[in-house]
């Protein structure tokens, strides 16, 4: 029986400036240089430039799937071809756009199939929160929660964690859902998670928030665990079998 693969979470970073280079190198190594990028159509110019960068780094083939309609994401033939890719990168400059297009579709189901077949499902730009069960979206000034794709069901991910108010926002999420581990991704950071929940920081600085033992009152929060990790640090995440 084939062993499942990996999930990769990339904090917001500009691939055209090399801010995601360390993670890209590892992901291409895992996939044998074969990749597909999925994003809303309006991001196509950025993705075409990104593809050229990946090819210059040694990628053998980089496909682009620019999604413009949910009907496109419902196409089972298209989803089946995507499921055969060793590496699929979800990318969005606005996460809500991508979530509206693919949540509950055949394309979203294909992402789970990529993982089950031993491939890598990655999320970059603003798409990292979408892999979790709960997706903290918006800014700290205007936060909102939505259901994510649920591929990493034990976590809630927030990118741009260096932003003002981001810690407070993610802590509120995990205090409300203490079964989830919060992952705060600072700009340029990246995390790789294997099928057993073993995770490694590939680049940048990553914060983990665990409220499973926290006690709250109107005046205070006690016992909220916060770990701040740098490159090569390893940690465990909860994994819920399908």
Image (cartoon, helix red, strand yellow):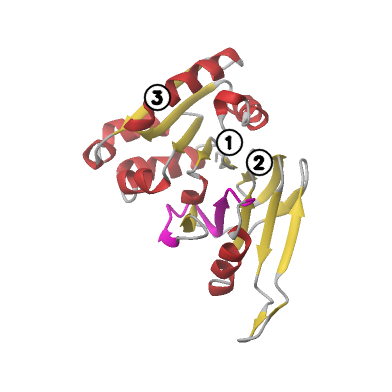
Number of callouts: 3
Q: What residue range appears in magenta?
A: 143-162
Q: Mark 1 and mark 2: span between their CA atoms?
A: 8 Å
Give the label on residue 2, or none.
none
The residue beneath circle 3 is 64
In primary-sequence order, the first of circles 1 and 2 is: 1
Please report the residue visible at 73 percent of the width from the left and 63 percent of the height from the top. Answer: 226
Residue closer to the observer: 50 or 122: 50
Residue closer to the observer: 24 or 167: 167
In primary-sequence order, the first of circles 1 and 3 is: 1
Q: Mark 2 and mark 3: span between their CA atoms?
A: 23 Å
Please report the residue visible at 30 percent of the width from the left and 31 percent of the height from the top. Answer: 78
Q: In this view, does 6 lie to the left or right of 242?
A: right
Of labels 2 and 3, the one closer to you: 2
* Residue 39 image offset from top left, x and y in percent: 39, 34
125 in magenta: no
The residue beneath circle 1 is 13
Q: Is mark 1 on a helix, strand or loop?
A: loop
Q: Please identify the dominant SS of the magenta region.
A: strand
Q: Quadrant of the N terminus?
A: top right
The residue beneath circle 2 is 189
Q: Is residue 140 above or below residue 52?
A: below
Give yes or no for contact between labels 2 and 3 (Cβ–Cβ under 8 Å): no
Of labels 1 and 3, the one closer to you: 1
Please report the residue visible at 56 percent of the width from the left and 64 percent of the height from the top. Answer: 169
Q: Is mark 2 on a helix, strand or loop?
A: loop
Please report the residue visible at 64 percent of the width from the left and 32 percent of the height from the top. Answer: 23
In primary-sequence order, the first of circles 2 and 3 is: 3
Give yes or no for contact between labels 1 and 2 (Cβ–Cβ under 8 Å): yes
């Amino acid at each position: 029986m084939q062993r499942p693969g990996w999930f990769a979470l990339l904090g917001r970073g500009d691939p055209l400036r090399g801010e995601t280079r360390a993670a890209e190198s590892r992901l291409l190594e895992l996939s044998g240089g074969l990749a597909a990028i999925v994003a809303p159509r309006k991001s196509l110019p950025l993705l075409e430039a990104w593809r050229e960068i990946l090819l210059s780094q040694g990628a053998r083939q980089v496909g682009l799937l620019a999604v413009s309609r949910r009907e496109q994401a419902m196409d089972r033939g298209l989803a089946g071809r995507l499921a055969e890719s060793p590496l699929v990168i979800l990318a969005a400059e606005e996460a809500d756009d991508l979530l509206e297009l693919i949540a509950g579709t055949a394309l979203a189901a294909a992402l789970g199939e990529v993982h089950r077949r031993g491939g890598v499902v990655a999320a970059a730009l603003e798409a990292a929160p979408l892999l979790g069960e709960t997706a903290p979206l918006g800014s700290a000034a205007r936060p909102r929660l939505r259901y994510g794709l649920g591929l990493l069901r034990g976590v809630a991910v927030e990118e741009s964690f260096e932003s003002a108010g981001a810690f407070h926002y993610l802590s509120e999420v995990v205090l409300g859902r203490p079964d989830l581990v919060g992952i705060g991704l600072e700009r340029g950071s990246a995390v790789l998670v294997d099928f057993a929940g073993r995770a490694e920081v590939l680049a940048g600085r990553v914060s983990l928030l665990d409220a499973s033992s926290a006690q709250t009152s109107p005046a205070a929060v006690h016992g909220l665990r916060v770990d701040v990790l740098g490159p090569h640090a390893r940690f465990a995440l909860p994994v819920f079998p399908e």
